[in-house]
Image (tube, helix red, strand yellow):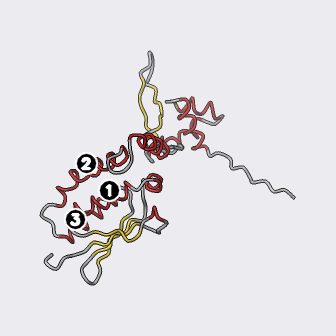
Amino acid sequence: MQLKRAERKPSTRGLLLTLLKTNGPMSAAQLAERLGLTEMGVRRHLYQLVDDQVLETKQVRQPMGRPLQLYRLSAEGDERFPKQYHQLVLDLLNEMESWGTGADGGVGKLFTGRQRTLLRKYEPRMEAKSLDERVLELGSIQDSNGYMVETEQLEDGSWLLHEYNCPIAQVADRYEEPCACELALFRELLQTDVERIECLAKQGKRCTYRIQKHAEE
């Protein structure tokens, strides 16, 4: 007996988003007509999508009567559709490999430049802070950048910084430069010895950094 997977019927909100993605801004009446639904029923969905910041509205003047309200995808709403950003980045990095390999090659220069940019951006947040405060600040920085960070202080005063997510995992799986530059950045920001003891790109469950605390700190 052959089993068939039941096909999921697209939701009304999913259909609304698809129409707006493929047609651009539309009114509630236009959407209702395309879906074969009442305008009141469509508006309930539209109001909720606006509240969820998935849709935006804009007013369009008409020759006569009240302005027409159109609905369109917000930046957040557009992100609900499939993207291939990581593949684009990998393609560009692959092209840069032809410029040379190693630290002096195109890929190495790219990530070294990114490391310098991040150092300039975050160094001011480390000023006049103790090592403990710098570690917590670094954890906050990385967490806000999507790395899902947890910090842990050990009995000897040293720290472990765990990253449970890597926003550039596909790149790090293929190139060593992102991980090397992240480690170098952490050392410069914290001004102490930092060692990576686990890495997502090397089949680890997380990226973990051991941060040494010197006796005088």
Q: Which residue is mark 2?
A: 117
Left or right: residue 23 versus residue 93 is right
Mark 1, secondary structure of its residue: helix
> What residue occupies the far bottom of the structure in this picture?
155
What distance separates the C-alpha of mark 1 from that of mark 2? Answer: 11 Å
Report the disc number at residue 199.
none
- Side of 2 relative to 192 (left or right): right
What kind of residue is marked 3?
Leu
Which residue is at 48% across, 34% downward?
71
Type of amino acid at the residue the image marks with label 2: Thr
| Residue 148 quadrant | bottom left
Q: Residue at x 41, y 41 (%)?
A: 96
Q: Secondary structure at mark 3?
A: helix
Quadrant the N terminus occupies: bottom right
The mark lying in front, picked from 3 and 1, is 1
The first of marks 3 and 1 along the sequence is 1
Q: Residue at x 18, y 61 (%)?
A: 126
Residue at horizontal 36%, vertical 43%? 106
Dot placed on the residue nearer the N-terminal end, 2 or 3 = 2
Can see residue 38? Answer: yes
The residue carrying mark 3 is: 190
The quarter of the rendered structure image containing the C terminus is: bottom left
Q: CA distance from mark 3 to mark 1?
A: 14 Å
Relative placement, left or right, of 75 versus 214 is right
Above or below residue 161? Residue 38 is above
The amino acid on which the numbered mark 1 sits, given as a three-letter code, is: Cys
Q: Position of residue 122 (x, y in %)?
A: 22, 55
Q: Secondary structure at mark 2?
A: helix
